[in-house]
Image (spheres, rainbow, N blue to C red):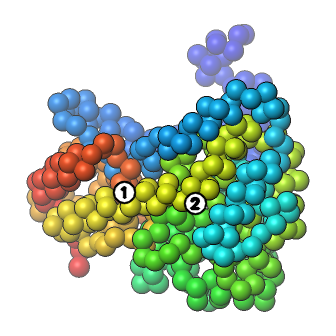
Amino acid sequence: MSTETSEKNNVDPYFQALFADRIGGASYGKDTEIYKFEKIKRAKRKALSDHPGRKLLDFGIGENDSMADSRVREVMNQEVNKTENRGYADNGIAEYKEAAARFMKRHFDVSLDPATQINHSIGSKPAYAMLPACFINPGDVTMMTVPGYPVAGTHTRYYGGEVFKLPLLAENGFLPDLDSVPDDIYRRTKMLVLNYPNSPTGATATREFYEKVVALAKAKQFIVVQDAAHIMLSFDGPPLSFLQTPGAIDVGVEVHSMSKGYDMIGWRMGFVCGHERIVSAFADVKDNSDSGQFMAIQKAAAAALDDDSIPTRIQAKYKRRLEKLVASLKRCGFDCNVPGGTYFLYAKSPSGTEGGETFAKAEDATRHLIEQFGIVTVPWDDAGSFLRFSVTYVADTEAEEDALMQETEKRLGDAGLVWNK
């Protein structure tokens, strides 16, 4: 029987029982659960079908709307034609590591040896996939904040480890309550994964919080991995690096990305920096996972890191857009403020409408707003019900931004949203 015939007759392929348990084992590919972002896609398709003349106002897109700076693209254009850039980059070129070291010194007064304390990554996502391989054995624990980016947790489970979730609650300033963690969890914890400025809550960490994390890591014997992808999009003060904390370099690493603060989302560049032994372990796993990012991209990224006008301009743009969005949402009944960082606004989800609609969770509110009003948000129900608005919508001018806000405010006004007290 051919593969085509087998699939048509719903007969499992001979290798169905061979799939690893970590991805579902013999049940792989049979899960009928519809995931959040697929539900959003379906709601968007329905909205466009039911209202073909109505434009979607898409606040769900979580990626920069602009191309990389023209100066960065020009460096790329030059480097892509150089013979010396054609080969494998393996664990990275000195030029990018040295630029990363200059960046850390200039912005955070953190001194790092580019040869031993920095290693490039093909974007930050692979770093979170690889770092658990350095530490997690069966039964070990990775503590992670929720809501948040799940990759380190997924790979922790791949290695037989467990994930202990630390809910981010508004009453705690969206910082994890580390005092509530049971001693048994601390005894088995190998890694604590943090993310500040935080996606999706927009919260920023404090120096006091990082000092507590460093003290706990030393006392409880675990390492810290701080996700700094949005660090250059800090609005409530100068960007704060975990590695600025006294003793932080003794307990962990920070992972930086070129995506958010440099408009280089598709270029896939980032770096891991901090304790040289952890960086070395990451580099060893990486050496057995990929052969490095294209050298021309590394050189263009190095030029970006050396140009502080780029993140300054991007930060100003997204702060301006967030201020406009907050003003509009407040007039429609939302209780929200400009976040400490990121280009996300995390707002308490409405509980229903004046017309009698009720929303048991944020996912219901999201679907209603998409299908009935053409407004796209991302729901989070991990620690309370919240909607995430992203200001990465496409608008070439401030006048277009203002027009989008006016239309958003009009549609939300028509929605008649209400919130439980």
Q: Where is residue 30? Give x, y as percent.
A: 60, 36
Q: Is residue 200 visible?
A: no
Q: Is residue 328 left or right of residue 67?
A: left
Q: Is residue 76 above or below residue 175?
A: above
Q: Nearer the viewer, mark 2 or mark 1?
A: 1
Q: Is residue 42 above or below residue 329?
A: above
Q: Where is residue 388? Give x, y as percent.
A: 38, 59
Q: Amino acid at mark 1?
A: Lys
Tell me if mark 2 has few (under 14), some (14-19) or many (20+) residues whose alpha carbon lies within 10 angstroms of its own: many
Q: Amino acid at mark 2?
A: Ala
In the image, 164 versus 374, the foreground residue is 374
User: Which of the 4 quarters of the picture holds residue 80?
Assistant: top right
Task: Say which residue appears at 74% left-offset and 73% top-offset.
Answer: 111
Disc 2 to disc 1, how far (Cα)? 17 Å
Q: Where is residue 114? Give x, y as percent.
A: 80, 61
Task: Say which residue appears at 41% left-offset and 44% top-offset.
Answer: 65
In the image, 18 versus 367, the foreground residue is 367
Tell me if mark 1 has few (under 14), some (14-19) or many (20+) residues whose alpha carbon lies within 10 angstroms of its own: some
Pointer 2 residue: 229
Quadrant assignment for the C terminus: bottom left
Which of the labelled discs sits on residue 317, or is there none?
Answer: 1
In the image, 241 versus 196, the foreground residue is 241
N-terminal-most mark, 2 or 1: 2
Tag 2's secondary structure? loop
Q: Is residue 89 visible?
A: yes
Do the numbered discs 2 and 1 sit on residues whose CB atoms are within 8 Å? no
Which of the labelled discs sits on residue 1, or is there none?
Answer: none
Q: Where is residue 33? Give x, y as percent.
A: 51, 44
How many marks overall? 2
User: Which of the 4 quarters of the picture holds residue 170?
Assistant: bottom left
Tag 1's secondary structure? helix
